[in-house]
Structure formats: C-alpha cells, structure tokens
Amino acid sequence: MKKYLIASLAALLFSSCGKDEKPIDMEYPEIVVTADSFPLQCSVLQRGTTLQFKALFRDNAELGGFSLDIHHNFDHHTHSTEVNSCVEDPVKSPVKPMLLIQTFPIPDGLTEYEGTAEIEIPADIDPGDYHFMIRLTDDEGWQTLQGLSIKIQ
Amino acid sequence: MLPLLLVFVGSLYLSGAEASSVPFQAGLFFLDEKESHGHAAIRRDTLAMDTLGRVQDLELFTVEGRAEQLRREESSAIELIRQDFIRENRGGSLMKSLERVPGVNLIGIGSGASKPLIRGLGFNQVMVVENGIKHEGQQWGADHGLEVDQYAADQIVIVKGPASFKYGSDAIAGVIDIREKLAPAEEGLGGGVEIGARSNNAWFGGSANVFARKGKWFGEARLTAADYGDFRVPADSVFVYDFGVALSDNQVRNTAGRELDFSGRVGFLGENFRNILLFSQVYTRSGFFANAHGLEPRQVDAKLHDCSSRDVLLPYQEVRHTKLINRASYAVGRNFVQLDLGYQRNDRQEWSQYVNHGYMPAIYPSELPYPSTLERAFDKEVFSLNIKDELFLERHDLSFGASGEYQRNTIGGWGFLIPAFQQYSFGVYGMDKFRIHPLWQLTAALRYDHSQIEVEAYQDWFPSVEDASQATSEDYLFRAEEFRRDFNSLVWSVGANYSPGNLSLKANLGTSFRMPIAKELAANGVNYHYFRYEKGDPTLEPERSLQLDFGADLKKENWLVSFSPFVNFFSNYIYLNPTSELDILYGAGNQVFNYTQAEVLRYGAELSVVRQLSKQLSLELLGEYVYSEQMSGGKKGFTLPFSPSPSGILNATYKPKGVGIFENPYFAVDFRVTAKQSNIVPPEKVTPGYQLVHLRAGSAISVFRQTIQADLQVQNLLNTRYLNHTSFYRLINLPEAGRNVALSLSYQF
C-alpha cells in the first residue's frame, strides 16, 4: 500500500512535469557545404576584388546568427577545421594584414538559411595565407565553427 | 516546499526501483577503522581532562570509530577520508585520489591538476579548507587545479551539501576540509619517506618528512616533489573540431609537468593553551595540450614537442601557492576557544605564444609591460581570521564564531578575462547541538554574513577597429567599469539525528548562499579557449540554495549499508548562458555568453553497501546519481554544465592472513560502470558510457625489523578508450588516460 502511494505520488509528479515541457533542443546547427558555397578550403582570392560569401546554414529548431572573421595566418597557427591542409607560403611577419570581423543576424523562425555577404578585399593588404572563420549559432545557443584556410594573392 | 518533497519521494522511489538494474545509485562510503597506536595514545592523554578530551575528539577525529561517530553526530551528509585511503587510491592529484568517494567527482585537466565537484557542483560552489583556513585559488577557471600537497593531507572531511552556516560563502554545494597530521605523540625524532612511480605518464615523485617532539614543543618539515611526462591515451590521433591531430606514441603532446612543495610547522602543546604555526608552499608547472590551447586548434612544431615527452613548452601554466597559518586554542572549564589567522598568496601565470585574436594587432607591441608569452597572470593575496568558542554543557554543545577575510587581486598579461578586484567579508554564527534524548539529537544554526567587492576598471591595450591607424581613444574599450557591490546574507540550518542501535538516521534542512565572484559580476572579454564572449552582470544577487538531506546508515552483522539522498533548490543559480547572439565590438565576432540567474532543481543520492562474506573477503557496491534541471530562464529544461553521469563501482576486496614478511596484505578489484550522459547543455556533447577495471594490491613488508608499506595499482586495466563528461578536454574529444601502473613505497621511522 505504502509503495503504491509512493509510486502514484511519483507518477503524479513526473507526469505533471512532463506536460508543459517542450522537448529541449540538443542539436548543433550545421554549416552545409554545397556546390554554391564559397569560399572553400584552399580557395585563392585576389586583392582588390569582392569576395562573394555564400554558405547554407541549417538547424533542427531555429537558427540564431552567424559571423565571419578573416585574419592572417602568416605564422601558420591554425583555426582550420578542415582536415586537408593547403599549400602554404613560408612563415613571414605581417605588415598590413587584412582583418575582418562581421556579424550577421538571421531572420527569426528559420531552420534553413542561405548566408551571403559581399566582402571587399583591399588592394593594399599583405598577400599570403589567411583564415576564414564562420561561426554559426542557433536560437538555443549551440555554436558551430568552421575554419577555412584561404590564400589572398 | 511540497513539490520538493514530492520530487524527493519520487527520486527515492525511482532509485529504489532501479537499484538492481543500473549502478545508478549513490553512495556512501565505508571507512577503515584502523588506528595507529600513536593516535590512540594521544587520545588517552587527552581524555584525562573532560573538555579537552572532547575537544580533541572533535578537532582531530582520531578516535576509534570516529568516522561512524561523526556520521551519527553531524546532521549533514558527511564523509571522513583517511590517509590510508588516499595512499591506496593515489592519483596524480588530490581530487583524483578521492574520485572513488561516491558523490565526489572532479574536473580534470591533464594528469596533474584537478578541481573538486561535489554532487555535480564545483568551482566556487565547493569550498576547500586546509588547516582551518579557506583555500583561495583562482577558482573560476576549469583549467585550474587545486594547489594542495596531497601527501601532507592526513584526514579529509567531505561535507556533501550546503555548509554555509559553518564555513561561510562558497560552501553552498559542499566542503573539502583537509587536515594535517596530529602532532607527534612521543618524545624524540621520527619521519617518513614515500616514493612512487606511475607508468602512464612516467611519473616519479615522493614525499619525505621529519618531525620531532620535545616536551610540549614539536616541529615538522616536509618536502614533496614530482616530475612527470606527457600522459598517454589509447588513441593515435584525436580530432580537435574536425582538425586531425596525430599523437606521437599515444602521448598527449606537452602535458608534462612538475611539482615541488614544502611545508613546515612548529607547535606548542600546553595543558590548556596550544599553538601551531604552519607554513607551506605548493609550486606546479604543467603543460596544456599543445594542439589545442583551450579548445582552439593549433598547428604546432610537432618535432620540437615530440623530441622529449618530459619537457614543458608553451602553452603551460605555473602556480605558486604560499600559506602561513597560525592556529591557537585555549581550553578552560567547559570552554574551548580557537583563533586561526591566515595569510595566503596564489600567484598564477598562463604562458602561451601571442596570437592576435580579434582586433589585437598582428605584431605584439614591444612597449607592453609583459613578455609576449605571458597570456594571463593572476595574483591573489588573502588575509583571513576565524575565531570560535565552543561550550560543552551536559546536553548542549554550543558554538559561536566569527570570521573575516580580505583579499586583493591583481591581473597581468596581454589576455583579459577578469578585472582586478578587492573584497572583504565577515560573518558571525551560532550553533547548538542538543542531545534531547539518548537516541535523539537536534542541531540548529544561524549565520549572518556581509561582504563587499570593489572591481577595478580595465581598458584594452589595443583599439577595437579593423584599421588601427584610424583608431580614436574610444576604440580602446573598457572591458570593466569600476564599481562596488555590497552583499548581506542570513542563513539557517536545522537537523536531527536518531540513532537506535544499529541504525542511524538523520535529516537536515538548511539554506546556504554564495556571493557572486568578480568574473560573474564583471567579466567582459572573449575567452579564446572557448571562442566565446563572456559577459558578467554587475546586478547579480547572491546565490541561494535550500537543501534537504537525508541519511541512513545500517550496521548489522556482516552488512554495512548507507544511503544519502538529497533534494536541492536554487532560487537564483548563477549560470553562464550561451545565447544566439554574436557580438562584434566587445566580442570580436564571438558568441555571447551572459551570466544570468535561474531557478534550479537538483536531486540525487549516494549509496554504499558493504557485505563482509568472510573474515578475508568483502564485497562493496558504491553508486552515485545526480539530476539537475533549470526551472526558469533562457535554458529552462536544460541541465547544468558538468553534470556527472550516474556511476557505480562494484568492488571485491580480499585480505588474507599475512605470510612470511608480508603483513596485512590486500587485493582489491574495482569494476566501475559509468552511464551515458545525455543530459547536456550548450556547448556540451553527449558523452557515452564506459566500464573500467582497476586493481589494487598492497602489503606491509618487514625486512631487517623495519616495515615498508608497498601499494600497487593498475588503473584502467584494459586500456579502455573513454571520455569523461567532466573533463576539461571533453569538448575536443580527447580520451582519458590509458592503462596506468602505479607503485608506491612508504617507510616510517
């Protein structure tokens, strides 16, 4: 009898908890590489041109935002999350390296979004190896990073 | 209160129902009641005087059966760990040695550093006390270890639950109270040497002490040293994000380290007055996994790192912790008065190559006051004072106390996480243990605390603009504004113990609190170890917790069973909440993590069952389970970070009769089962379950009329590849250490 009572109390408790609970989001957003994605690992860009960034973002529940970051990799530190490494120039000291940090919102309520951005690559920056980092968040705060090694000539 | 009780009943029921299926339970821990002759002698000494005898019992925990007595007298969940246990389970750090205790976990980094988690809470929510004074490290970092010499620790009291009423702020989740050895009982000189070796990381180390007693005076000195190489994992490569890292010879590149500690004490033991002056210094230098500083993948000069597995190259951390403590006590009549004074300094540096993250300039400016390899430095100085008076009446043990602390924190290095700050705090408390009936005891306590924190401003040394030549003075961001906060807190606790015969039952209901720390109030920088922008909130209120603890111990014939469930509610748990935002100016494009407060419900239990099958053979089952859920705020429905997986240990211990030169030999096997942890919160990952086998054996060996204690351990016997959910390196999928054979020899003279 006592055990039955405890069981029903427990059942009451857990069922009452269960009703108003929506399932929590446990999935990271994805940066999906498609035929249109640019840049890709080891892409080569030209100074004085405009980079047309394009990537497909996907999430099971709702996307948050994304940011782009270009910084030099003349010292060959790595942020690359891509496994194949590119042919790198020799290590050198930066003089006027390019630096870009930009954040972009994603409209509310989307589970799929094509991120695009136009990025001007100044003509007077140091050519060489650069990192291109994409940070993508979803609404719940899961973050996915993608780091690409690119070359600017 | 009703929902709390319901949850408690529910959890009890559930854990009871599933006890046989999963090692899901929780536990209590069986203590070895052996006592050395020296300790027993002291007790005889001191029992002569009524008050002092009691005081000795209380202060030094030396009496036969003391662990059990302690559990019966304290209404909170409490464990007493002895030196024997630490020796037999010795790991690379103190917390690693205590990992077997149910309800105790650790956040480990590398093989030589770790910090405690009690029932899933850690950092500033667990207080570490050494020789009566609160240990103040830089507690907020997951990569910081606990700066304690594990060889100097003689007895450790672990309070698994809120203990603010006795210890003050930070004891909201529990206390690890480390006590030194007793003063030598006999006249003359003595000492000991313990040396050891560990195969996994080629660890060599040991500790030696000498002591002397002459009349009422005694002195002791100890030196501990350890040197170890990179630890090995059962994997030849790991993936930091998707970045593949080949490991040379299974070694985790650059995780070698060294430790050098020394301590000394001088004491006067009068009939009524006692005074002990202690000095200690713990120095550690240990490398971080070179391919991932924090969670950032790094290209490294693998050749340079791999030519020696014992060198510590960049990145590494270096900590020197110095303490000076004076403990004075005076026993007169029914009073026992104690005054502890402490000074400590935690001087910490994190060394790493300069990497221009975010808007930092590409080339490190030579005019900065720090070398380009000093990423961060923290220097903390703390002055503490505790005073208490205990009054032993016929049916009441009353105690009153006050404590005060002042600390000064400065920072350095090119990286910024938390600003410099000063803080002071004081508290007063009163406590009564009332023996209402031979079988019943009631405990009640009340405490008031006040604290003030003064945070200094911090301005970036670089402008946050893409083109530094266009920078104006506004582009040099203020990462922290100067501000001051005052906090007040009143906490209470009531408990009862009922001990009829073989059974001992207890319950405790109490509140506890924790003042927000500087990081939670004032952080405003990018933590490049995690690629996140951490933003403090200067309006945070002190964290408050209400906890209900139960405990049941049964000692009958060949059974020893302990069960300690708890349920705990935080009305405003301080939580670093990952958001969907990315910040461009202060956050350099990184994800924003805000410190916020949320309601949190936690419950769980520990279970321990020991069955003595015969004089020689015993079986033991230990288990722990904790569940946490955020009940409000942005992460409603999620758990808390670093939630330990349910786990259990099945142990068999065989203690045959001594043969020849072998005395008191033992053989033990632990089968550890840890369940999958799928209760996670961003940015954690689901951690699969695992099973491990550990072996332990040892004996006292008598040769030439001298006794040497030898202990052998084989940890992770099957070289299992597994991930620990609470490890610092979990997020980059770095497996835990592989098979490790550890031998230690100890000799007392």
Image (cartoon, coloured by chain):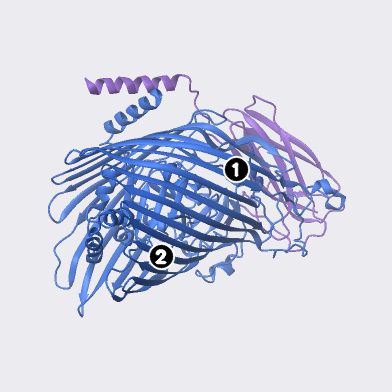
Up the image or down, B252 lies above or below B19; here it is below
Residue A65, image x, y percentages: 67, 34
Quadrant placement of the C terminus of chain B: bottom left
Name, please, the residue furthest toward the front: B333
Q: Secondary structure at mark 2?
A: strand
* Chain that is blue in the image: B
Exactly how many numbered labels are in the figure?
A: 2
- Whether residue B641 is visible, yes or no, is yes
Dot 2 surroundings within 10 Å: few (below 14), some, or many (20 or more)? some
Quadrant placement of the N terminus of chain B: top left
Quadrant of the image occupied by residue B515: top right
Instruction: State if disc 1 and disc 2 touch (CB < 8 Å).
Output: no
Q: Distance of mark 2 from mark 1, alpha carbons?
A: 37 Å
Camera-nearest residue between A85 and B473: B473
Residue A152, image x, y percentages: 78, 52
Q: Which residue is mark 2?
A: B276
Up the image or down, B11 lies above or below B620; here it is above
Q: Secondary structure at mark 1?
A: helix
| Chain A shade | purple
Q: Which sits earlier in the primary sequence, circle 2 or circle 1? A: 2
Left or right placement of residue B295 versus residue B196 in this view? right
| Kind of residue indicated by mark 2 | Ile
Residue B374, image x, y percentages: 65, 62
Q: Mark 1, chain letter?
A: B
Q: Which residue is mark 1?
A: B520
Q: Residue at x 22, y 42 (%)?
A: B561
Dot 1 surroundings within 10 Å: few (below 14), some, or many (20 or more)? many
